[in-house]
Image (cartoon, grey):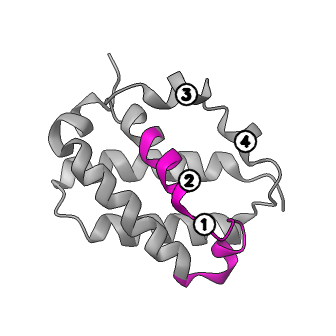
Amino acid sequence: MNPFQSVFEAIGEEKIKELVSYFYQEVETIPELRKLYPEDLAPAERRLYLFLLQVFGGPQTYSEERGHPRLRMRHFNWEIDGKMRNHWINAMISSMDKLDLDPNVRELMLNYFIKVANHMINHE
């Protein structure tokens, strides 16, 4: 069983969609993050939404459409250092803060995001 299944059960698709929407609103306000994306954020927003649905125990649409996530490989084209990691994680934390999340669910999600953000660092 997916250890994050409880996240999907607790918050459902709509809250994940809200989280992703808030995240990309944050991206728009952080020049260092914004420059990593094309002008149209909609495709990236959809990919993150599908990815988080899958990670947190929902439908497996992301893998059905795109295959294995291979996060480091997919992000290797961008220099991700500690500062960029902090921009990303701060945007995600700010987005999570806009949702009314159970503290235990929030902690599970935050721990996942921190672990993944740290794993994405590919540049000093």
Q: Main secondary structure of the magenta part?
A: helix
Q: Position of residue 80 (x, y in %)?
A: 75, 60
**Residue type (three-letter) at the residue carrying disc 3:** Glu
Q: Residue at x 23, y 50 (%)?
A: 14
Sequence-wise, which precedes: disc 4 or disc 1?
Answer: 1
Q: Residue at x 80, y 52 (%)?
A: 122
User: Dot 4: few (<14), some (14–19), or many (≥20) neighbours within 10 Å?
Assistant: few
Q: Quadrant of the N terminus?
A: top left
Query: Quick check: marks 1 and 2 in contact, CB under 8 Å?
Result: yes
Sequence-wise, which precedes: disc 2 or disc 4?
Answer: 2
Q: Circle 3 sits in a helix, a strand or a loop, which is it?
A: helix
Q: Circle 2 sits in a helix, a strand or a loop, which is it?
A: helix
Which label belongs to residue 110?
none
Residue under circle 2? 43
Residue 55, magenta (yes or no): no
How far is the residue under mark 2 from the one under mark 3? 13 Å
Q: Is residue 4 left or right of residue 113?
A: left
Q: Quadrant of residue 96?
A: bottom left
Which label belongs to residue 40?
1
